[in-house]
Image: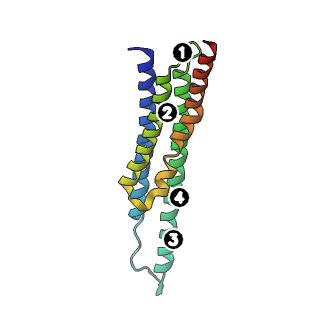
Amino acid sequence: MNRSMAKRMILAALSIMCCVFSIGYSREIYALMTGPFIEDPEKIIVDGADFTPVAELAVSGANGFIILFSFGSYVMITTIFALISALLSRIFIIRKNYNVTLSDIKFSKWFIIISSVFAFIAGIIMTGIKFIPYAAALSWQQPLFMFLIYYLPLKRKFNEFLKTD
């Protein structure tokens, strides 16, 4: 197997793992938001007074906090994983002594775009049209970091290689 194929496989594996994180967390947020984590209490009577509204308010607040905390955690985890994936791809794929070809540039660009769009669309399909902002919040990291940390240095290396010839 040549270096170009190995680079493409590493890029594909890292991008697919980022997509799996985005899609899985989109599905998890959907599950949290569509079904209450804590069920509403039935009638709560304390010393003859009805405390049901207070308990329902507490349950709604707890459910909202769980969703907010989970969503924030998922966005942070997805961002950190996408950043680490982009850094690993830059470290392992872009070597000083390796010449970059035009096909490497084109493959990288289109694979990053297609995998990112796939993650976003799959997140929407799995969660529904109402959850577009959540799917977007969980899938923007991979294209941004891959383009900034991996693709642009790869393209710069290719342009430097052209100038030296």
Q: Is residue 37 visible?
A: no
Which quadrant of the figure has residue 41? bottom left
**Mark 4, mark 2: which one is toward the viewer?**
2
Residue carrying label 3: 58
Residue 42 percent across, percent down from the top left: 39, 77
- Alpha-carbon span between mark 4 and mark 2: 34 Å
Which quadrant of the figure has residue 91? top right
Crowdedness of circle 4 by 10 Å Cα count: few (<14), some, many (20+)? some
Q: Nearer the viewer, residue 130 or 17?
A: 130
> First in sequence: mark 2 or mark 1?
1
Element at label 4 = helix
Kind of residue indicated by mark 3: Ala
Query: In the displayed image of the protein, which residue is found farthest to the left?
Result: 126
> First in sequence: mark 4 or mark 2?
4
- Alpha-carbon span between mark 1 and mark 4: 46 Å
As drawn, the label of residue 99 is 1
Element at label 1 = loop
Kind of residue indicated by mark 4: Leu
Residue 31 percent across, percent down from the top left: 39, 57
Q: Is residue 162 visible?
A: yes
- Alpha-carbon span between mark 2 and mark 3: 49 Å
Residue carrying label 4: 68
> First in sequence: mark 1 or mark 3?
3
Query: In the displayed image of the protein, which residue is found farthest to the bottom?
Result: 48
Q: Which residue is depicted at the point 56% across and 35% down?
A: 147
**Mark 2, mark 3: which one is toward the viewer?**
2
- Alpha-carbon span between mark 4 and mark 3: 15 Å
Element at label 3 = helix
Q: Which residue is depicted at the point 47% across and 84% down?
A: 50
> First in sequence: mark 2 or mark 3?
3
Quarter of the image that includes the C terminus: top right
As drawn, the label of residue 109 is 2
